[in-house]
Amino acid sequence: MTHLAPPAGAPRTLYDKLWDAHAIAQGGDGQTLLYIDRHLLHEVSTPQSFAMLREDGLAVHRPATQLAVADHSVPTRHRDQPFADPMAAAQVALLERNCADFGIEYLALAGEGQGIVHVISPDQGFTLPGITLVCGDSHTSTHGAFGALAFGVGASECGIVMATQALWQERARRMRVTFTGALTPGVSAKDMALAFIGTVGAAGATGFAVEFAGDAVRALSMEGRMTLCNMVIEAGSRTGLVAPDDTTFAYLQGRPRAPHGPDWDAAVRYWRSLPSDADAVFDAEVTIAADAIAPQITYGTSPGQVMRVDGIVPDAGAAKALAYMGLEAGAPIDGLPIDHVFIGSCTNGRIEDLRAAAAIARNGQVAPGVRALVVPGSMAVKRQAEAERLDALFLAAGFEWRAPGCSLCVAMNDDRLPAGARCASTSNRNFEGRQGAGARTHLVSPAMAAAAALAGRIVDVRTLA
Amino acid sequence: MTPLVSVAGAAWSLPDADVDTDIIYPARFLLITEKQGLGRYAFHDRRGEGFALAPGQERAAPILIAGPNFGCGSSREHAPWALAGLGIRVIVAESFGEIFHSNCFKNGLLPIVLPADRVAALHDAARDGRSFQVDLRARTLTVEGQAPIAFPVPDERREALLNGWNEIARIRALHAHDIEHYEAGQRAAFPWLWQKEQADG
């Protein structure tokens, strides 16, 4: 599966431009040694990477290109106290010590820079168009929303990048997903992401770099574009992309780690050259009518098992998943009782997501028997929400207001659901046990999650006045 | 890295589609910061009800015949570490999660992609307890008494597995000058990517 570069002088896609601009050397079998501009580190995927460096007595090649933060294993409350879980405490302490030993900047847990790795990096302007960026996390595709070539890697590749600033990679095929028209009220970027996964399937984009295009994508904020690119891995792809434009530049200008002064002007001139050439050829084209997308919800244990909230649960080949989920084929999903709600994660933990949830939450109270968590994606998001009094609004409506972290998206911290619990969740994976062994997850948008919290059941957010 | 030249023995059959890395290695065990000894957590929440793959069994098998999209989801390298901890060296499937596929090669595991009908026949052979032979030099997989099946594997990755190469050492030995040359060019053309180093002097 080797996919060669377009011939010299031929029109190129955004993906090919990014690839070609970072090619250091070509391997004998179609692999390219790519230069890596930025590396994000978190506590879970790097202990073994640092161990590789220690074993071979190596230094970090360019510490200035690395940025570390703890997010996966951190508790989201009582952050002024020692961790309840000594293994989580040791893991976070190890990241801090490794960063100190190797000269890497670590954003302290108690500081204003902490948050989910894929939220803080764009927050701070560490993510930029035109760069290559990796992280030991499959949702690194999020950063492609800026027109960066960003992809998840394993712990070994984290170590290779730290030691050499380079990775052997195979060029992907190119897929363009065009969302025509405009979204209708009550439908968001999350629904676009889920509709895309439902269209191509959970492995439908494996081997492809996915560029999102079309009017509905151009109309999205950077937060929405990040949500869209975040979930390409749920369709099998490591790389999502949106071409940088004025929305991108307006978001980045003035952020602390973004270029400034004459560098800013030069950078924007370069970034404007990145979008795919008009007649560039893609290996696959998918078109989705944005105005036909209804609020989406997963019914199974793979993100590809997704449906319209106003539809009936299908039975095609999903018997095992439906048994796990406690659902019957042929039944409506609207009205299904839930007992947990999670609003947060690298998919939907940004300020716009919290605003969308708050706009619903302000109209009622969390239903009796439902536990609803709101977990901002970063300290910056938390502060912004608090400045807008969203915290008070959520608390008054019966939601819990937490400190930033991955929380119930990964359930390797203090936030875990019991077996049999049913959760409307804004996160990205509905895998078996993802939110706790035996727990059942329905992926939805922030507005749908908030609506479920108030109703105590799955409800079509469009039917709320 | 442990070299892989040839592997012989029995095979597990796990035909489910979309076996994700959360199933292979549940997230709560990600708090462990080592990579040795993780086999005991492999498929932890799938055990029981006759589930085959578990540590400490009489019948160990170095080959896993899996379903499509095996290893999808998270990038956690704990998944291949845990499979290696069970003694698995070769995984055969119609398709793999991309990051998992890449992580296998970094840890002396060989993922083999074959067409669905071939994989279906291998599931039958695994369930029948037939013995398998994988020869990476010849790029063939053979079920006892049957004709060898050729499988594709990129040259560079095959060489790395055969030789147990240390990838960092290899990049440094062969491409340090290329990297230096690239960096000089980037520093001149895109100085904003070097502003932190410039500020730090």
Image (spheres, rainbow, N blue to C red):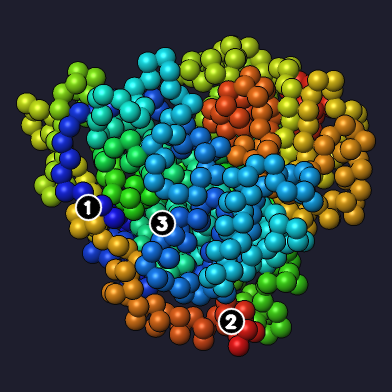
Badge 2 and badge 3 both on one subunit: no
Give the distance between the C-alpha atoms of the residues marked 2 and 3, in whole angstroms. Answer: 26 Å
Can residue B185 be seen here? The reply is yes
The residue identified by callout 2 is B197
**In the shown orientation, is residue A372 left or right of residue B82?**
right
Badge 1 and badge 2 both on one subunit: yes
Image depth: mark 1 or mark 2 in front: 1
Q: Give the camera-side residue of A30 and A398.
A: A398
Q: Work out whether A418 lies above or below A246.
A: above
**What amino acid is at disc 2?**
Glu
Q: Earlier in the sequence, mark 1 or mark 2?
A: 1
* Helix, strand or loop at mark 1: loop
Q: Give the camera-side residue of B3 and B72.
A: B3
* Helix, strand or loop at mark 2: helix
Horizontal and vertical percent for residue B34? 45, 49
Name the residue rendered at 77%, 36% in the picture.
A373
The residue identified by callout 1 is B3
Q: Residues within 10 Å of mark 3 (few under 14, many from 20)?
A: many
The chain that hosts pointer 1 is B
Name the residue rendered at 60%, 88% in the picture.
B201
Name the residue rendered at 29%, 45% in the picture.
B109
Task: Count numbered badges in the picture.
Answer: 3
**What amino acid is at disc 1?**
Pro
Horizontal and vertical percent for residue B160? 24, 58
Q: Residues within 10 Å of mark 1 (few under 14, many from 20)?
A: some
The residue identified by callout 3 is A156
Q: Give the camera-side residue of A219 and A404.
A: A404
